[in-house]
Amino acid sequence: MNLKVDIKTYSSKDVAKRLSIEPVTVRKYSQMLEEKDYSFNKDEKGWRQYTESDIRYLEYLCNLKTSGHSLEEATDRVASLYRDNLDISQPNIALYQEDNPLFLYMKKQEEFNKKL
């Protein structure tokens, strides 16, 4: 039995409108994330197709930037969450507070990864 689930996807223009940023910014952020092993679905033309999960990650990236993080730092953090299969369900929660157990875990994991 072949079960195919259709997942709603969005174009960079749709994502940009939803996040109140320019489509070129969505593409730039996406490219930077891909350089850090984030993977987007692509259509037959090779255009990125964004899922709700992708949009949450991009929204979180925008929130990090707005709160004063550099673009490089924000993409590193988002890509790290993605690689660790951690979903962003509420992007407005401050994950990077020193007393947050998730933050402490991520710090230890980053230190471990650097030693490899």
Image (cartoon, grey):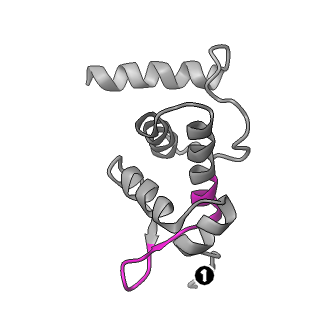
Residue 98 vs 71, above or below: the answer is: above
Residue 24 vs 77, above or below: the answer is: below
- Residue 31 percent location from the top left of the image: 37, 58
Residue 51 vs 61, above or below: the answer is: below
Task: Name the residue located 58 percent from the left edge and 37 percent from the top edge.
Answer: 64
Camera-side residue of 65 and 85: 65
- Residue 82 percent location from the top left of the image: 50, 46
Q: Quadrant of residue 17?
A: bottom right
- Residue 39 percent location from the top left of the image: 42, 59
Q: Is residue 63 left or right of residue 84?
A: right
Crowd class of label 1 (few under 14; some 14 to 19; many from 20; radius 10 Å): few
Task: Name the residue located 43 percent from the left edge and 81 percent from the top edge.
Answer: 43
* Residue receiving disc 1: 3
From this viewpoint, which residue is outermost toward the left?
116
Q: In this view, does 63 lie to the left or right of 30?
A: right
Location of the N terminus (image quadrant): bottom right
Q: Kindly identify the amino acid type of the residue bearing the numbered disc 1.
A: Leu
Location of the C terminus (image quadrant): top left
Q: How many marks?
A: 1
Camera-side residue of 91 and 53: 91
Q: Quadrant of residue 71?
A: top left
Q: Does the magenta stretch include residue 67?
A: no
Q: Is residue 48 magenta?
A: yes
Q: Quadrant of residue 6?
A: bottom right
Q: Is residue 86 left or right of residue 48?
A: right
Task: Name the residue located 63 percent from the left edge and 51 percent from the top edge.
Answer: 59
Task: Name the residue located 38 percent from the left edge and 19 percent from the top edge.
Answer: 111
Q: What element carries label 1?
A: loop
Identify the magenta region: 42-56
Q: In this view, does 43 lie to the left or right of 10?
A: left
